[in-house]
Amino acid sequence: MVSVANFLTRAILLAYSGSVTSATPANVLQGNIVKPRDAVFRDAVTTHVVPMRSHALDHPQEPQALRRRGNKRGNLPANLTNVHDIYYIIDLLVGNQTIPVSVDTGSSDTWFVQQPYQCVSYFWDEGRKPDCGLGDGFKGNLSGGNIPDVLFGRAYTDGTFVQGYFGYEDVTIGGLTAHHQTLAIVNLTYWYGDGRVSGLLGLGYPYMTSLSGAMDSQPEYDPVFTTIWKSNPIAPIFSIALSRDDNVNATAGHPKDETSFLALGGLPPVKYDDASWGRTPIQPISAMISSWGIDSAEHGLYIISADAYVYGRTDNVTGEVVGELTRNTTQFPILIDAGSTLSVIPKKMCEAIYAAFDPPAQYLSSTGLFYAPCNATVPKFGVQIGGKTFYIAPQDLLRQNARDHTGEFCRVGVTDSDSPPHVLGVTFLSNVVAVFDVGNHEMRFAARNAY
Ligand SMILES: *[C@@H]1O[C@H](CO)[C@@H](O)[C@H](O)[C@H]1NC(C)=O
Ligand SMILES: *[C@@H]1O[C@H](CO)[C@@H](O)[C@H](O)[C@H]1NC(C)=O
Ligand SMILES: *[C@@H]1O[C@H](CO)[C@@H](O)[C@H](O)[C@H]1NC(C)=O
Ligand SMILES: *[C@@H]1O[C@H](CO)[C@@H](O)[C@H](O)[C@H]1NC(C)=O
Ligand SMILES: *[C@@H]1O[C@H](CO)[C@@H](O)[C@H](O)[C@H]1NC(C)=O
Ligand SMILES: *[C@@H]1O[C@H](CO)[C@@H](O)[C@H](O)[C@H]1NC(C)=O
Ligand SMILES: *[C@@H]1O[C@H](CO)[C@@H](O)[C@H](O)[C@H]1NC(C)=O
Ligand SMILES: *[C@@H]1O[C@H](CO)[C@@H](O)[C@H](O)[C@H]1NC(C)=O
């Protein structure tokens, strides 16, 4: 999930709290120990693997927050579309408390609520009882103390926001500890959820921690995974295998093919096609968001450029491609974001994919997204990265568990936008093993075996 930039962030934060104060240095400088890497690196399955519980929101087509906004929707500062209907959960050990968080590669801060916290309504939602749907928060004080005078504030593209301050605590994931980790503690939020998570684990680069909207600049700090690879004997990579099925009861002892994993320092234990590895450089943050006024050569998020997007109709009986696939080589930066359910691609291309459903997908204004009959013939759609094409399975392109209120229309797994960020989200990621090689600034993908 990407925080929204500049005016929207400012508008929301100003509405609640006056301005965000200027920052004092908050960095935790960890020695810059870069692990030696083999010249030709072969990823190995790591022992530092954390199963992720995946969970779909009960009413994905009509999340509570959007429903509650009701006819006051006209007051929104921008069209807000909830495209986050499934999320992936791990337990963080924070000090000696277990805090469930959702996993996000589209942001860098790790935050969670602290008991007691304040849940607020939006200004267009006044007078209704707020219900943020976050789980129990951290209790008591952080053992490393708080950082005085630096406020934390993030607003996300779906209209949610969190606010609080920073402090230090040990955080353990998959048996690896980030000691004295800078963490954001939230005591004021507008959120919606169903109580299964209390925060978010941001897996982006340090650079993104410094941003609270493009106009605010805070000193950056090492986020959780950076601290972990700098201070533990693992390679500076993590990898993700997201599985599409709701699997909220996944446990470490019972890994199954459909389990989702976060793996630190290597690969997760899932089956994939070893001949399908494609690799591509991670691009600097300026590749995507210079339009947000960020013009840095630093790496911030997992931005890549695909070689091509391929798509076309399929036969309604055999499932074979009808005619030739369109191979669109238009180049644009695209974000690998486990915190976004749908993939977001440019409008013209996406319209060709909507039209290639049979019957064609159609816009449902009540949802702001495209749907097709749940029994429609699904087109072929693939993304070519590093010379290899990764196809999105029909069940990710037409999502049987995300239906409209009639139950006959299913949500399409891609959505269109002509403004950044374009995103390869869960609907793409559930077809691949994704390796985030932050040491080499490279993404690698392999096609998952069918599951
Ligand atoms: C919001 O959506 C409506 C209907 O699709 C469209 O007419 C309008 O231009 C959109 N506004 C913005 C700010 O995107
Ligand atoms: C957890 O840690 C706090 C302080 O860090 C300590 O006071 C408390 O006793 C610990 N609780 C348990 C169950 O270990
Ligand atoms: C947390 O810290 C505050 C301020 O230092 C203190 O007043 C409070 O008693 C502490 N709470 C706990 C549970 O230790
Ligand atoms: C949240 O914490 C900050 C920093 O300690 C404090 O200034 C603010 O009043 C707190 N807000 C709420 C709603 O508790
Ligand atoms: C998950 O576990 C809970 C508690 O054991 C149980 O009530 C629930 O039905 C399980 N859900 C699934 C999808 O298996
Ligand atoms: C497949 O498409 C053909 C031609 O449009 C149509 O006649 C036929 O009924 C369709 N079959 C199925 C199973 O949808
Ligand atoms: C490829 O996609 C771009 C971006 O949507 C679009 O402008 C262009 O027309 C497409 N090209 C073809 C051949 O469809
Ligand atoms: C698809 O489902 C609709 C009802 O939901 C039905 O009328 C139609 O015949 C079905 N089409 C196919 C090709 O099965």
Image (cartoon, helix red, strand yellow):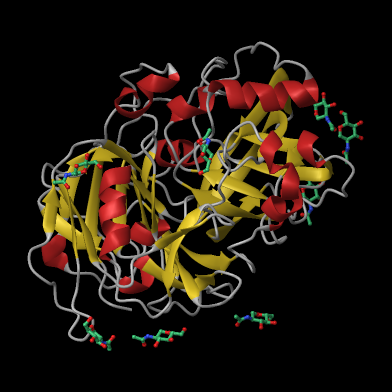
Image spot of residue 42 (x, y percent): 17, 54
The residue that appears at 11% across and 41% down in the rendered structure is 39
Residue 386 in the figure: left or right of residue 229: left
The residue that appears at 69% across and 42% down in the rendered structure is 73
Number of residue marks: 0
Answer whether residue 122 is visible to the viewer in this image: no
The residue that appears at 73% across and 47% down in the rendered structure is 71
Residue 86 in the figure: left or right of residue 308: right
Vertical placement of 307 versus 195: above or below?
Answer: above
Residue 396 in the figure: left or right of residue 127: left
Task: Please state which of residues 166 and 195 is positioned toward the viewer in this rendering.
Answer: 195
Task: Please state which of residues 154 and 39 is positioned toward the viewer in this rendering.
Answer: 154
Image spot of residue 273 (x, y percent): 18, 69
Image spot of residue 309 (x, y percent): 19, 51
The residue that appears at 44% across and 52% down in the rendered structure is 338
Image spot of residue 211 (x, y percent): 53, 23
Vertical placement of 219 versus 104: above or below?
Answer: above
Q: Quadrant of the C terminus?
A: bottom left
Answer whether residue 69 is visible to the viewer in this image: yes
Task: Please state which of residues 355 and 451 is positioned toward the viewer in this rendering.
Answer: 355
